[in-house]
Amino acid sequence: MTAFVIFAPAVLDRADFADINVGETRPINICGLYPIHEAERLFIHDHGLEAFWQLGWDPYDVGRPPVV
C-alpha cells in the first residue's frame, strides 16, 4: 500500500466527528485515514472516490489485495 484515502471515520456518526467546538475560532473535524494500493489511487483519480468506495473493499485489512 502506497497511499491513503482521507474520508469520514467509519465508526462515528457525523455529529461525533464534524464541526467539533474546541474553544477556538474554528471547529475541528475528525477524519478517517484508509491505506490503499497504487492501482486503487489511480482508479480513484479516474473514476472518483464514490465509485471506489462502492467496490466492497475492507478498509481495516491492511494485508488485502487491491480491489482493482
Image: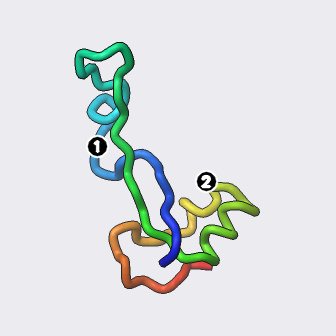
- The three-letter code of the residue at mark 2 reads Glu
Mark 1 neighbour density, 10 Å: few (under 14) some (14–19) many (20 or more):
few
**Does residue 46 appear left or right of residue 65 in this picture?**
right
Q: Looking at the image, which residue is at 33% across and 69% down?
A: 60
Q: What is the CA distance from the residue labelled 2 to the residue labelled 1? A: 19 Å
Q: Looking at the image, which residue is at 50% across and 71% down?
A: 36
How does the figure colour the protein chain or chains?
rainbow
Q: Name the element at disc 1.
A: loop
**Does residue 2 appear left or right of residue 9 in this picture?**
right
Q: Which residue, given by chain and number where applicable, does mark 1 sit on? A: 12
Q: Which quadrant does the C terminus fall into?
A: bottom right
Q: Position of residue 11 (x, y in %)?
A: 28, 50
Using the image, determine if residue 21 lies above or below residue 43. above
Q: Which residue, given by chain and number where applicable, does mark 2 sit on? A: 50
Q: Nearer the viewer, residue 3 or 14?
A: 3
Query: Badges 2 and 1: C-beta atoms under 8 Å apart?
Result: no
Q: Looking at the image, which residue is at 50% across and 58% down?
A: 5
- The three-letter code of the residue at mark 1 reads Leu
Q: Position of residue 13 (x, y in %)?
A: 31, 38
Residue 51 figure quarter:
bottom right
Mark 2 neighbour density, 10 Å: few (under 14) some (14–19) many (20 or more):
few
Q: Name the element at disc 2.
A: helix
Of labels 2 and 1, earlier in sequence is 1
Q: Position of residue 29 (x, y in %)?
A: 37, 34
Residue 25 figure quarter:
top left
